[in-house]
Structures are given as C-alpha cells and as structure tokens.
Amino acid sequence: MPPLAQTIVTRLSVMPYATPRSEIESWSKAEYKQLIGEHLDLLCRLKVLKLSDFNYEINPEFKETFINAIVAVTSGSTISKDALFTILPGQALSAEAEAHATASWKRVMELVLQANNTVTQRSPTLDALLKCGLLKRANGLLGPTSDSRRFLLSSTRSQVWLFCLGYVQSFSTDAGSSLVLRFMTLLFQLAPLVPGTPYIVSDASDPIRSLIAILHQAGIVYSPTLTGKKTPDGADKSFAGELIVVPTTLSAMLSSITATYDTVKAGFIVVESNFKVYAYTDDPLHIGIIQLFAELAYELDGLVVSQITPHSIRDAFHHGLSASDIIRYLEAHVHPAIFARLLEDAKEQGKAVASESAEQGDRLKWIPDTVKDQICLWEQERHRVKVLSPSVRAIRGFVSTEEFGRLRKWAESQGYLVFATGEDRVQDAVLVVTEASFGDVSGMIRKVRGR
Amino acid sequence: MDLESSIRNTQGCLIEVDPSIKEFIQHISSSSGSSRSIIRAELDERHLLIDPKQLDFIMKEVDNLHERNTFIEDPEEDV
C-alpha cells in the first residue's frame, strides 16, 4: 500500500466517526488534494474504506482485524513474526511459473466475463471464484455478483487484491477470525518474495494448503506440489514432502506499486469525441470487456469498433459499474499512437516534455472531455431521485418555533433526526424522524407540552 | 383543549430531488389520479414524502423521461 494510503488507513482506524473528505484533505498541504482523492478512491475500490454521504470510514471487518493485529504484535501473542517461506535450493522456475500465471489469470477473467446465468461445468477455478464472491450460483445457474463487472474493469493490481480479500473475507466470522490473521500474514509475507524462485511453506496446515490451492488456481502462485510434481528440477529430493510455492508476477502486485503486469503489453483503445471506441485487438476477453459499456458496431480482423450510447452506459450502471470505473479503464488502455501525437503537438507548440512521469500524466488526458463529462452526467441522472430514508414519520403542527427547536435538538442528540425544515415559520416547520423512534419522539412531545 | 391534537404525523419514504424532478413527480401523481397516490407530503422545494410502494414506479418514470429527452442518432445514417 502506498505510504499516503497507509497514513490515511492508520488515522481513520482510530476515528470514532465517519470522516468528511474535507477533513481528510486538511491533513496535508493544498497541492496534494488531488493525490489524496485518488488514494481515497483506491482504498474504496479495495473495500478498505466505505463511502457514505461523502463521509469515509474504515470497513468494520478490516478495522477489527487491523486493530487486533496491532494489539497482537504489541502483546506478543498471535501474530507470527517467523518467516513462512524459506528459499528452496535448486533451479528457478520463472518460465513455468509465468506460463501458469498467464493461462490461469486469463481463465479467471474469462469465467467472470462469461458468467451470465448459465449452466457451467464445475472446475477448481470456478470454485475459487465462488469462494471469493466474484461469482454466485443460484438455482444451479452461474451468474455475476455486484462486484464482478467492477473486477473486470479494474487494474490487474486491484483485481489480485479483490480476489485475495474476497477469499479472506469469507472467513470473517467469529470462528474464522484467527484464520483471517494467518491468511493476511501469509499474503503480506508472499508479496515481497522474488517471482520465479521456489519457496517451502513452513505452515502446511489444511487452511493454508486451501489458500495456496486457491492462489494456484488464479495463477498468483505456482505450486509444483499441487501439479503433482514433487520437487522442482535440481532440488534435493529430501524436500519431496514439502509444500512448495513459486511466486509469480501477480503475487508481486500485492505489494509494490511499481510492479507491472498486463495481459496486453500496450494500450489498444482510441476513443473519439463522437463516442466511437476503436479497439485494436482480437482478444475475445478485451472485446467482451468493452461490450460491458459500449455497443458493438463492427468486428474486423484486429479491429473492433464500438459505440458508447446512453443505453449501453445506463445498462453498465445497472449492473454495478460506475462512471469512474469506465473512464479509468479507457484511460488505462489508451493506444500509444495517441500519446505519440501528444508529444508531436507539444513539440510543435514549443512545450517541454519531461520524462516518464509526465508521459503517464499526459496520457490521462487523451479520452475526449466530451466523452468523460457525458458519462459522468449520465451517472448523475441516476441520482436525481435520492432516497434519504425508506421509512420515516414527518411531524407537523408545532405551537411555537421554540418548541420545534427544542424537539429538533433533542431528536438530533438521540440520533432520531432524519431531516428538519421550516425553522423560521412554525406553520412550515416539519420534523422528520425514523419510524422506529416515533414512539420515543411522541413521548418527548408530551413531556415538553406537559411542562 | 388537547394540545396534542395540533400534532400531525405522516408515514412514508423521504426522497430528495431537484425542483424540476419534483414538478415532474407532482405531474405524474396528479395525472395518475386516485388510482395511484404517490405524494403523501411536500416538505420543501427539494424534499418529498412518498408512498414507499411507488418508489420503483417513480424511478421508472424518471428513467423514461431521460430516455424521451435523449437524442439517438439514426443508425442507418451512420456510415
């Protein structure tokens, strides 16, 4: 996790209330406001934070585990500081591990994309996705969850974390809380290991074996033990009974913000201001992902033309995607020819173009603003009717503004108040309280008037 | 005199809308007539108390309004 995100998480974990974004932004200088916004967005997508009415708070399950981990370290109790992984002497397995990672991760993406209330044969990868909450089975049919489409449009790093956290969170019950700690310890120790190097896992208990099997199915690790190969070539045969894992480039995504992995090595999308999307690919996976938010117009050899329409975008929103998911996906896959054009234009205008960091930042501007703004407007249309509370009581008929003010303050202090208006004119004064609190509020009105 | 007789309470679902959508909801409520009573109370220019059972109907009508007011280019003209 980047240092700024770590700071935000640590501070919010001790806040007793949900914190407004403006307060979080005040923790640093004004010029870092946008960076803080990006980190808050990242933490929400990783489900570490929850956003409710523009206030941020830590996910309760994460908070409990985080605080327990800190307490356990300081009290020297359950967190193990012992290394779970020991290097296995022998030949590195980089090629095998990466081949396994590429094939397995592609299978994961295809299964999530194609699950559309269909009957699908069972497989270990499918079972892993069901366990992680990325797919669900209902009446024998396999279908997407509310997180499935967001998973497909996320960056590979976010996808790996969503996959791992989904599995770990499935154990976040009272009985499984110690397992959550062991799993998180394993993931944090796995992250910095060298991809391609075989390691022996010291804790070969059944829950850990199950977790390693899930990670192997996704290609996050490669385990020769699970493929029936007892030891890697060149390794001492005395290690034959051990649980051996080989981290892949995907497991490196768990830690480093500089680690990169992409099924497509360069961008392939060009978006025009007339809402046409040109994708220079013939990979069915990428074509399928684009069709989650755009309508297919033409499919040629090496080129797919799609159209972003109000209907396709509203359909995407209905299935759990947001405007920022779609825009982020398009920006992350911009064709390098667009950026080359940016460089040319900048040089013609005499602007200095700096190095890679500027390159990455300017790349983000090459989705037309008209397209980005219109997608955001279509999202805002969904929020034109906002449900504040599904079951309330609106109380009118106060005798004076003092009575109204007193009852309003009391209701607010008790957490009963949903909305209040008309403080200036008693004829217009309305107090809206939750349905469950109406009995208490009636009692308080009688008490106030009885005096 | 019973002082509590002046107190009136209405049960419902509280929604927040912009003034133009509030006008639209008032229009569909009045044109539906007695068969579908949608608005239970108008609290201010942005807040309404509605019948919770009519929420899905309101969302659908607002979506239809957006569809009607969106220009879709004729695909046959697009070469």
Image (tube, coloured by chain):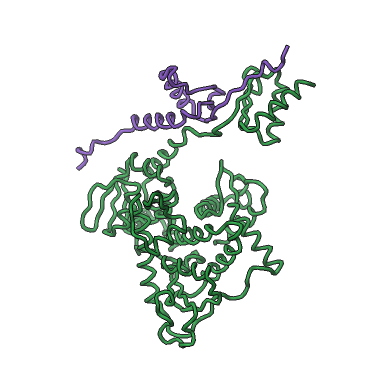
The answer to whether residue A144 of the structure is visible from this angle is yes
| Residue A97 position in % (x across, y down) | 40, 74
* Residue farthest to the front, as pictured: A139
| Residue A202 position in % (x across, y down) | 55, 77
Determine whether, in the image, residue A336 is placed left or right of residue A421: left
Determine whether, in the image, residue A171 is placed left or right of residue B34: right
Whether residue A90 is situated above or below residue B62 in the rendered picture = below
**Which chain, by letter, is green?**
A
Q: Residue at x 64, y 54 (%)?
A: A13
Whether residue B35 is situated above or below residue A436 in the rendered picture = above
Q: Nearer the viewer, residue A32 or B33?
A: B33
Q: Chain B hue?
A: purple
Q: Nearer the viewer, residue A340 or A255?
A: A255
| Residue A445 position in % (x across, y down) | 71, 24
Q: Quadrant of the N terminus of chain A?
A: bottom right
| Residue A35 position in % (x across, y down) | 53, 53
Q: Quadrant of the C terminus of chain A?
A: top right
The answer to whether residue A348 of the structure is visible from this angle is no
Q: Quadrant of residue A397?
A: top right
Whether residue A169 is situated above or below residue A186 in the rendered picture = above
* Residue farthest to the right, as pictured: A451
Count of marks overlaid on the render: 0
Q: Residue at x 59, y 49 (%)?
A: A30
Q: Residue at x 35, y 47 (%)?
A: A293
Q: Quadrant of residue A120?
A: bottom left
